[in-house]
Amino acid sequence: MKFSRRDLLVWSAGAAAGLALTPVPWKLLDDTSIWSQNWPWIPQPAHGPVDVKLSSCTLCPNGCGLRVRMANGSPVGIAGMASHPLTRGALCPLAFGAHQLNWHPLRLRSVRHRGSESSFEEAHAAFGKACAEGPVVVIDGYPGRAASAVLESFTAKKGEYRVVRGAESRALASYEKWSGVPAAALGYDIENARTILSFGAPLLDGWGIPGRFTRRWAESAGNADPNVRLIQVEPSLSRTAARAWQWIAIRPGSDAAVAGGIARVLVEEKLVATRGPMPPMTLTDVAARTGLEANAIRELARAMVGQTPAVAIASDYNPSVAALNVVLGAVGTRGGIVLRSKAVRSADSTDAAFASARAVLIDSSVPWEFVPETNAEVFRFAAWDGGSSKADWLLPAPGFLEELSDIPTAPTAGVETYAIAPALAKPPHTTHSAWQFLVAVDPSLDTPEKIIHSRCAELFRNRRGTLHASEEMPLAKIASPEKLEEQLSQGAIWVGEPQRSNSFRCELKEWPAEAGYSIQFGFPAAWSPPVLPLLASKLYEESNLRGTTEGRTA
Amino acid sequence: MSARYGMVIDLDRCTGCGSCMVACASENNVPALPHATARTGITPMLVRRVSNGHEGVQRREAFIPILCMHCEEETPCVHVCPQQAVEVDAATGIVMQMPQRCLGCRYCMTACPYHARYFNWSDPKWPKGMETTLNPGVATRMRGVVEKCNLCHARLHSAQEKAAAAGKREIDPADYVPACVEACPTAAIQFGNLADANDPVTRESRSPNTFRLLAKIGTEPKIYYKSKEAWVRALAEPNSAATGTLSASSSASLEAHHG
C-alpha cells in the first residue's frame, strides 16, 4: 500500500484531533507552566519562631505606637498599637512598609568621602583633626532624645548645638515670641477642640501624630453637623480639603489676609470676649486679596464661634494665624494652644551658626533636604542615600528599629509623653550613630542607654502621670525605676498630666506685619528618611493615588 | 454556610491615605516590582480617587477602595475558570484563588466586572536581604498566575488554629481582622459576618446610604459602600444624570448600582 503525501496529512490531522481529545496536551501545558514558574531562587518567607513586640516608630518625631510582628528574629510586619493613648492604633501609610526600609536599595552601606569609598577610621581621624582646629556645630532633627542629649553635651565643650525644626514646630514659634515660653513646650489640645480652622495644615494627611486627629474626626465624619468641624482654608483641593466639613478656596499666599479678616470681624462684631489688636486691613482689602467675598469672611468668623472651643492651625510659621488664635482666646485655653511642659528650653536657630565652624556634624534625624550653607567640613549621618549630597562625609547610620532610642513628646502633642523603642533588628553592615561617633571622640560622654536609665529614674521620682500598657496604670503604682524602664522597653507609654489651662499667656500689642510662610505640603510632612518604603512607592505609582515624588525619592 | 464575611466601607471616612493598600501588600508578600504600572502591578486593594466632575470651588472628591467583591451568586470568575482554581468557600463565603491550580489564562480577569484581579507577570523578587521581611504566614506566588484579595485568608487560618487549640469550633471575631481593616486610621472599613444578624456590619449594610457596585447584575457582592453625599451615591447610578467621574489609573470605569 502506497502511503501518499495526502495520507500523511490526513493521518497527522487525525492524530492531532485524537490527541486533543485526550488529557495529554492539556496536562503537558499545565505542567509546563508550573515547571517554568517555580524555581529554587524564588524567595520564600523565612520560617522560625513568631513573636510580637511593642515599640514606637522612630522615622519621624511623632513616635507612633507600633506592634511589630517578628519571625526568626526579624520584623516581618507592622501594625498600630491599639493601646497607645494618642494614636489609638492608627499609623501613617508608610509605617506599614517600614520594616522593609532597612533593605532598601538606597541604603547607605559604606562610608563615603567626597564620592569615594572610605572608612569610619578615616572619618574619625578627619573629625578629630577638625575638632582640634576649631569649633564644631552639631545639627539635630529630633531634639529631646537621649541621643540628642549626647550631641548637646559634646557641643557644650567643643562648639554649638542646633536644631532643624519641622513645619509643625515652626507654626508654634510666634507664641514663643509673644509669651517667652519655648515653642517646644507648647502643643495643640486637639482632643477638646470642636471647630478647627486649618490654614493648609494637612490634618487628615499626616499632620502631627497621624491618627490622633483622624480617629477623632472619623467618629462624626458621616454626620451633617459633626462633633468636630474641620474648616480647611487652602487654595487647592487637598486630601484634607476634600474631606473637610467646609473647604474655603483662597488665592495662594493669602492665608495671613484671611486670618486678619476673620480677626477683624470677631473684634468688630464683638463675637469674642478677649481683646486683641485690630488687623490693619479692611474687609474690602481682605476680600480683594483673598478672592473671597466679604460676607464669606463674616460667615467664616461666625462659624468659628458657632461651635467652641475653636482653634486655628497654620501649616508652617504664620504669625497672623497665631494672632487670630490670640484674638479668638484659643491660647492657653482648653481646645486651643496649650502649655504641655515646663522643663523644655528654647532651641536655637541654625541661622548664622556656621560662620566660624570648622566642622558641621549632621545627625541622621535631620531631613535630607537640609543643607547647611557653610565652608566647614560636613559630616552627614544617614541610613539612606537621598542623592546629590553636598556633605564631605556620608556616614552609614542605623536604620529602622536598629538601635535603642527613646521617644520624647511629639511636636504637636497636647501632653507630655515618653516611650522607649528598643533595637529589634540587626544592621546588615557596620553602622554608627552620630552619638557613637562623638563618644568615640570624647569617651567621657554618657551613652543614650545611661541617659534613658536616669530619665526613667526621674520619671519614677516625680510620680506623675500614667503608664499606658495593656492597661492604664498610675505611675505611682510602679514598684521601681527598673520596673518602669522594663515596661517602657516593652512598649508602654508614659503620659503626663495636662497643665493648668491658664498657665500660659501671650501679650500681643499690635497685629503682626510679618507674612509668614504659606507652603503646599508634600506627603508626608514629618517623614525624615529620604526614601519611601518600596511597597508604598509601588502602590502609589500603580494607583495614581499619590505622586511618589511628593517630597521624597521613590 | 456558617459565615458570610463581608465589609462596609464608609466613604465619608476614607481620606485616601493608602494605609490599606500598603498593609495589604505587606501582609500578602506582594513584591515591589520595579517599573510596574497600573496594568502590570498587583494591587489587591486599590484606592481610587473620584470627583463630582466639577472644577474650581464646586469640585468635590472622595476615595473608593476597590477590592475583590467576593460575589456570592453566579460568581463570574468561578464560572469561567477552566482549572477550578477559583471557588467560593461555602464555610466563609470568601472567593478563594488557588495559584497552584491556576493556568494563567486570565479568563477570570476578563470576567471580573470590578477589575479586581491582577496577573503576576514576573517572578516575585525583592532587593537582596528583603526576603527576610516576608510574612511567614503567606507563601509567595509564582509568575503566570492570577492574584486577588482573599480577605487575608492566612489570618483566618490562624484564628481557626487558635480556636481549635482552645477546643472551640467557632473563631473569636476579634482574632480574624484583615490587614486593610486593621490598618485603616479612620475605621472606614468595617469587617464582619453578614450571616449574623447581630453583627454591626450586617446592620450597617442595611442602612439607607449603603450601596453596592454593580448590584444589578445579581452577583450579590459582599462589599458594601456607604456615603451621605448624594453625588458619591450617584456614581453608583448608571442611568443618573452622571455628575461623577471615576478618575483612576485604569481607563475602565465602574458602573455601580444601589444594593
Image: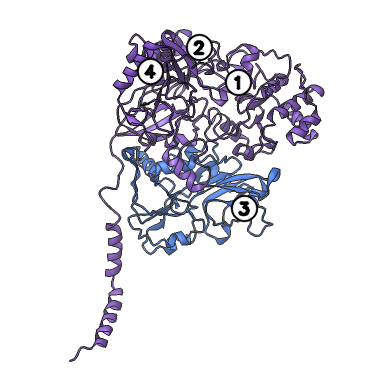
Chain colours: A purple, B blue
- Circle 4 residue: A435
Eyeballing the image, is A199 above or below B231? above
Dot 3 lies on which element? strand
Give the amino acid type for the residue marked by disc 3 in the picture: Thr
- Circle 3 residue: B245
Give the amino acid type for the residue marked by disc 2 in the picture: Arg
User: Does residue B178 show up?
Assistant: no
Quadrant where the image shows the N terminus of chain A: bottom left
Query: x and y percent of residue A183 in the render?
Result: 58, 17
* Residues at discs 1 and 4 in contact (Cβ within 8 Å): no
What residue is shown at x 68% (from left), y 49% (from top)? B54
Mark 1 or 2 closer to N-term?
1
Judge left or right: residue A424 versus residue B149: left
Residue A232 image-quadrant placement:
top right
- Circle 2 residue: A464
* Residues at discs 3 and 4 in contact (Cβ within 8 Å): no
Q: The disc numbered 4 marks a residue on which chain?
A: A
Residue A535 image-quadrant placement:
top left
Give the amino acid type for the residue marked by disc 1 in the picture: Leu
